[in-house]
């Protein structure tokens, strides 16, 4: 069953709260749809666990929370849970100097080309930073 | 070397003792946070009772910006009565919630705190 379209929610009386800190505000009905996780969502989950683990230690889990919390309200409300995760992972990898924006852009171009040759669909959307 | 002795040997900063004990009444600081903070807005300025001491952890407010997060901070589980949190709470008396709050967000409080008066 498809989930309802996500939209920006008004934050009446939010006075000074961070975007994510909405406990107690009127936010409409909770979306209770169950859905299977896509492969990329499972990979995103695994990637974050490995990146914050003691072996890699690329950044703390708290830094990941911070990046998600710092999204503007429109982005925060409209993108899904794992979209928030993967964007924040990307931003932190750049913030920590592990990969550069250019490397990510080059890799994305490669993948788009590979998909095009194989006749597979690839989103042309640019995900903002 | 015992586990305890090892952890003491590798500890870089002196770990503060717990300021509050289970059963003590505490008030969550009513202040804005600049940047990452794990104390929810709806609990700021509210009064509760320490349910347990959860342990001592590196400070997430610093870890969020790639800092070491030292000195470590004591984390408490604090129990709040729902009626003390929400102005218009209509659930049964005795309803409560528990939240993890770090020591630097807690102040000593007596039961006659203003928000409890308001909740009556």
Image (tube, grey):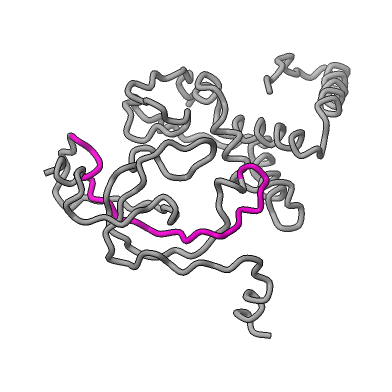
Residue B90 position by quadrant: top left
- Closer to the camera, B93 or A113? B93
Q: Residue at x 46, y 17 (%)?
A: A7
Relative image position of residue A27 (x, y in whole percent): 35, 26
Whether residue B78 sits left or right of residue A91 in the image: it is left
For the image, the number of numbered tags is 0
Highlighted magenta segment, given as a residue range: B64-87
Taking the magenta stretch, the answer to whether it contains residue B67 is: yes
The residue lying furthest to the left in this view is: B120
Taking the magenta stretch, the answer to whether it contains residue A50 is: no
Relative image position of residue B97 (x, y in whole percent): 30, 50
Q: Residue at x 17, y 34 (%)?
A: B88
Whether residue B6 sits left or right of residue A65 in the image: it is right
Image position of A67 with respect to A53: above or below: above
Image position of A79 with respect to B97: above or below: above
Relative image position of residue A6 (x, y in whole percent): 48, 20
The residue lying furthest to the top in this view is: A124
Relative image position of residue B101 (x, y in whole percent): 41, 52
Image position of B26 with respect to A37: above or below: below
Q: Residue at x 85, y 25 (%)?
A: A102
Q: Residue at x 58, y 33 (%)?
A: A68
Whether residue B101 sits left or right of residue A114 in the image: it is left
């Amino acid at each position: 069953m498809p989930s309802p379209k996500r939209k920006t929610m008004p934050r009446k009386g939010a006075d000074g709260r961070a975007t994510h800190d909405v406990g107690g505000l009127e936010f409409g009905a909770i979306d209770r749809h169950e859905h299977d996780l896509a492969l990329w969502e499972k990979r995103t989950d695994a990637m974050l666990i490995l990146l914050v683990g003691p072996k890699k230690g690329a950044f703390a889990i708290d830094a990941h929370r911070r990046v998600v919390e710092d999204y503007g309200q429109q982005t925060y409300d409209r993108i899904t849970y794992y979209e928030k995760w993967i964007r924040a992972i990307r931003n932190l990898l750049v913030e920590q100097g592990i990969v550069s924006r250019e490397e990510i852009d080059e890799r994305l171009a490669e993948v788009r080309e590979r998909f095009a040759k194989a006749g597979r669909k690839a989103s042309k959307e640019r995900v903002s930073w | 070397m015992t586990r305890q002795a090892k952890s003491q040997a590798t500890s870089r900063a002196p770990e503060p003792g717990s300021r509050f004990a289970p059963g003590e009444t505490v008030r969550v600081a009513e202040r804005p946070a600049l940047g990452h903070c794990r104390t929810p807005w709806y609990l700021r300025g509210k009064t509760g009772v320490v349910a347990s001491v959860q342990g001592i952890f590196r400070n997430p407010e610093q870890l969020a910006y790639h800092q070491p997060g030292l000195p470590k901070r004591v984390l408490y589980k604090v129990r709040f009565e729902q009626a003390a949190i929400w102005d218009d709470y209509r659930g049964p008396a005795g309803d409560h919630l528990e939240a993890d709050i770090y020591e630097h967000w807690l102040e000593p409080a007596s039961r006659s705190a203003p928000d409890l008066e308001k909740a009556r």
